[in-house]
Image (cartoon, helix red, strand yellow):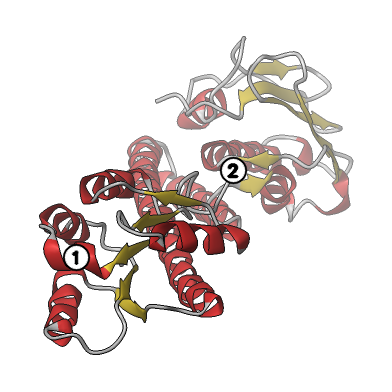
Amino acid sequence: MPFGGPYSERILILAPHGRDGEIASQLLQEAGWATLTCPDLANLCLELGNGAAVAVIVEEVVATEDLACLAEWIRTQPTWSDFPLIILTGHGDAPGRNALADRLQHLLGNVSFLERPFHPSTLISVTSSALRSRRRQYQAREMLERHDLLARELQHRTKNLIAVIQAIASASLQESKGREAFFSRLHALAAAQDLIINGAGRGALMKDIVGNAIESFGTRVFVDGPEVFLNPNAAQGFALILHELATNAAKHGAMTTDSGTVSVRWSLDAISSDPAILFQWKERGGPPATPPSRKGFGTVLLARAVATIGEPPHFDYSQEGFTYEVRASLAQQPQS
């Protein structure tokens, strides 16, 4: 398919009298381009709406017919578009030709004139230049659409991020040492945004999210998992989860003893119909794990920071140590 769409590189020809249309079409097809010969100006305007790269029109049409439909199409074309027209003129300086040329350029914009009889190579050259110009316009259109898409995504991500920050602030500042907890969680969130931005806004690698959280644990942590690229919501959610797990391990869990270890594993879930990741955090060698006396915001984050598939996250408090497991969606939005 052509770069700009199925009909984007067609060459429309309007030469209702004589053999000009037949000759031009044959030459252009021999050069490898698709052409369509239009019977009249109304049909040309209709086909312009379906897609085209260039229009080749004989002078007799533009000099004698009402150009209102063509002029209107040119006037209302998108901002990225400057549709090229090639006018096949007669030989010599006919009376009024200069005035007609000025009128057409004012009315139709991007107009080139080719005098008949023309050499085949001249028609090919002029058309090739017009086609290159049209392709650059298609590239400009694509860039504008990528810009609009990114702007909408940025707007969505910003609103989502502000909502997350508000939730963290509201809950964290109600806890003891709430100010410290808030800024610690905010730092983890900011680090996740850096990874997401480095991933062109599309997300981040799971190993990088894990690495940020456990970088201070040294050799007492074991990490195992495949290359998994998390979408922005999943990356943000796992960053908050890993921050809570690492903070708890350092303050209350395995990292409070010299013999304590942490195992971090993940794998892709091949059973689920939706893309999913199985994640496990296991602490061993530290003090016995006991359930918290109250449900704080950290527990809420562990339970709800990522969208889950099937059962909710599993919390195991045992004599051997704490274990956290979750089956997280890689396709859905986090729970609100």
Residue pictured at 55% horizontal, 40% vertical = 240
Instruction: Report the front residue among 158 and 123.
Output: 123
Name which quarter of the figure residue 251 lies in.
top right
Indicate the amino acid at tag 2.
Ala
Left or right: 138, with 238 as reference point: left
Q: Secondary structure at mark 1?
A: helix
Pinpoint residue 159: horizontal percent, then vertical percent: 32, 44
Pinpoint residue 191: horizontal percent, then vertical percent: 56, 56
Q: Quadrant of the C terminus?
A: top left
Residue pictured at 47% horizontal, 28% vertical = 333
**Measured along the vertical axis of the image, is residue 303 above or below residue 104?**
above
Left or right: 224, with 213 as reference point: right
Quickly name the residue at label 1. 62
Left or right: 328, with 220 as reference point: left
Pinpoint residue 65: horizontal percent, then vertical percent: 13, 59
Residue 32, visible in the rendered structure:
no
Quickly name the residue at label 2. 239
Pinpoint residue 200: horizontal percent, then vertical percent: 56, 57
Instruction: Report the front residue among 153 and 114.
Output: 114
Residue pictured at 62% horizontal, 10% vertical = 311
Indicate the amino acid at tag 1.
Val
